[in-house]
């Protein structure tokens, strides 16, 4: 008898949308396949295999680990959920009367919390941090009839002592991807976030310009709400003006230049420093954490640290470490000079208005420099997990110049930090008019629709959730409701009905199928 199992999810990855929220959940669907077969023998008649299926335990398990030189190793379980897919009563399975292996599929649909962090692999050399998710299936069964036990075999003599209860298990890695927003078939407007800085917050230490002048400068910076990790430029808009500054000082003040730098910062924490994260999201209890319950697939150093933790863990009391680097391109200094007349505040005393600067800052996908050796040295989406987090910021320096009454030029660097959010943007959905066009093209080309599943991407014929429901889960009202029902007339019933739109020109078909 041969018994095998496998786990088949409906999609290659589990996609999560929006910010992590403990009040939201996503669906992970698929099936666990059980294949039963009986091999043929040249010495005796083939006997069918019979087993009694007792349970099919499917577990979704998530874990995150950190391994650095300063912190050593730490691992924690993020989430675990187990369901039994087998019927409440034992079920007999047999391949009697079948020439090929018999297969049974037990479907599952697991609710996955919406706060889980995205999957993340260790950096080169298995250092840094990792977040992994697995589906683990264990099938328990009783062997009722095994054709391999021949009447004169040695196993027959030992059959009273042989345990008939058996189990088989398998595991599959599940990739969690997080996108900033759900996919849509229409281009979404770029959301901007404005940051207004004014007063002493802008004044740098040791500034030579009088403090009462610097405190009247206002800077309004606008950056995208989300930046795609696949993009290469950061749109930046700066608006500057003075408020309640006397005319004499406005004419003496000018903008010289500004400098920018995009910083990525990675933070690693020990398992003992996860209390803040645990107040926001429901991590499993200590009974479900290692070493009480080992991780399904721990780092190779995990077992050594659990057994020899007192000898391997660093003696330092440091519970976290940080590494950071610049995302500016290697040849980009990040300094932008202002050309032309730089006295942009000269008319503010009469009618204060914003002076606008717009630019696009190119950024690289590899870090320009790093302060520590445990980071990945590449651009990562912003996010956080119990022991690992990635944050981004824009370091902005605005240099102003002021003409003193003596004629001497004084300057001040106005420095501040703007938070940035990098994320993944979901690929757009197919246009709404592509489905009728594809149906028509296949009807004219093949005369039927057998190739439809191969031409359309997964789920292309289904509307997006955001098109049907709002963020609170309420059904959206249809802006163009269906017309009222009217009975079909006799003339209509005799006329041929064609539910598919037809194209008269071949060029129309080609254009429609390549959208």
Image: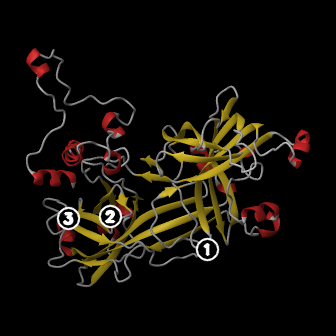
Q: Earlier in the sequence, mark 3 or mark 1?
A: 1
- Quadrant hosting residue 491: top left
The residue shown at (17%, 59%) is: 352
* Rendered view: 472 above or below 152: above
* Disc 2 from disc 1: Cα separation: 50 Å
Q: Helix, strand or loop at disc 2?
A: loop
Q: Earlier in the sequence, mark 2 or mark 1?
A: 1
* Rendered view: 52 above or below 64: above
- Quadrant hosting residue 354: bottom left
The residue shown at (21%, 52%) is: 513
The image position of residue 250, as x and y in percent, is 20, 69
Residue 215 bears which disc, if any? 2
Q: Nearer the viewer, residue 444 or 377?
A: 444
* Quadrant holding the C terminus: bottom left
Q: Residues within 10 Å of mark 2 (few under 14, many from 20)?
A: some
Identify the residue position indicated by label 3 in the image.
356
The residue shown at (53%, 52%) is: 117
Q: Helix, strand or loop at disc 1?
A: loop
Identify the residue position indicated by label 1 in the image.
125
Q: Is residue 287 left or right of residue 187?
A: right
Q: Residues within 10 Å of mark 3 (few under 14, many from 20)?
A: few
The image position of residue 172, as x and y in percent, is 59, 52
């Amino acid at each position: 008898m041969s018994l095998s199992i496998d786990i088949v999810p409906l999609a290659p990855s589990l996609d999560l949308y929006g910010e992590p929220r403990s009040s939201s959940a996503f669906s992970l669907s698929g099936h666990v396949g059980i294949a039963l077969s009986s091999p043929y023998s040249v010495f005796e008649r083939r006997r069918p295999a019979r087993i009694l299926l007792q349970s099919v335990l499917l577990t979704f398990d998530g874990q995150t680990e950190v391994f650095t030189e300063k912190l050593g190793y730490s691992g924690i379980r993020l989430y675990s959920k187990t369901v039994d897919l087998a019927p409440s009563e034992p079920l007999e399975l047999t391949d009697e009367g079948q020439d090929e292996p018999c297969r049974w599929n037990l479907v599952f649909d697991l609710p996955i919390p919406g706060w889980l962090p995205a999957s993340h692999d260790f950096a080169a050399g298995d250092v840094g941090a990792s977040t992994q998710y697995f589906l683990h299936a264990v099938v328990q069964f009783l062997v009722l009839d095994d054709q391999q036990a021949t009447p004169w075999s040695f196993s027959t003599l030992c059959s009273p002592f042989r345990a008939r209860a058996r189990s088989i298990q398998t595991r599959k890695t599940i990739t969690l991807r997080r996108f900033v927003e759900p996919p849509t078939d229409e281009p979404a407007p770029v959301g901007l976030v404005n940051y207004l800085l004014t007063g002493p917050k802008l004044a740098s230490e040791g500034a030579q310009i009088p403090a009462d002048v610097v405190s009247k400068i206002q800077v309004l910076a606008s950056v995208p709400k989300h930046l795609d990790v696949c993009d290469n430029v950061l749109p930046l808009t700066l608006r500057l003006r003075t408020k309640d500054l006397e005319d004499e000082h406005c004419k003496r003040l000018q903008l010289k230049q500004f400098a920018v730098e995009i910083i990525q910062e990675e933070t690693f924490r020990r398992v003992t420093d996860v209390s803040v994260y645990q107040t926001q999201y429901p991590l499993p209890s200590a009974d479900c954490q290692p070493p009480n319950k080992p991780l399904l697939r721990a780092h190779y150093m995990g077992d050594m640290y659990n057994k020899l933790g007192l000898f391997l863990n660093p003696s330092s009391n440091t519970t976290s470490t940080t590494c950071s680097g610049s995302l500016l391109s290697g040849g980009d200094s990040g300094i932008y000079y202002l050309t032309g007349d730089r006295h942009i505040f000269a008319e503010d005393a009469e009618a204060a208005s914003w002076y606008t600067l717009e630019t696009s800052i190119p950024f690289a996908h590899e870090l320009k420099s790093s302060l520590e050796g445990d980071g990945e040295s590449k651009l990562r989406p912003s996010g956080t997990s119990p022991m690992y987090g990635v944050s981004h910021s824009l370091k902005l320096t605005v240099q102003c110049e002021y003409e003193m009454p003596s004629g001497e030029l004084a300057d001040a660097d106005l420095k501040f930090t703007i938070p940035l959010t990098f994320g993944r943007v979901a690929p757009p959905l197919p246009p709404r008019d592509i489905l009728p066009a594809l149906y028509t093209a296949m009807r004219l080309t093949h005369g039927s629709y057998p190739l439809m599943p191969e031409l359309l991407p997964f789920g292309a014929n289904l509307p997006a959730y955001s098109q049907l429901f709002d963020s609170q889960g309420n059904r959206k009202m249809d802006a163009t409701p269906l017309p009222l029902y009217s009975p079909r007339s006799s003339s209509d019933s005799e006329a041929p009905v064609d539910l598919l739109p037809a194209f008269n020109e071949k060029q129309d078909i080609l254009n429609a199928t390549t959208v």
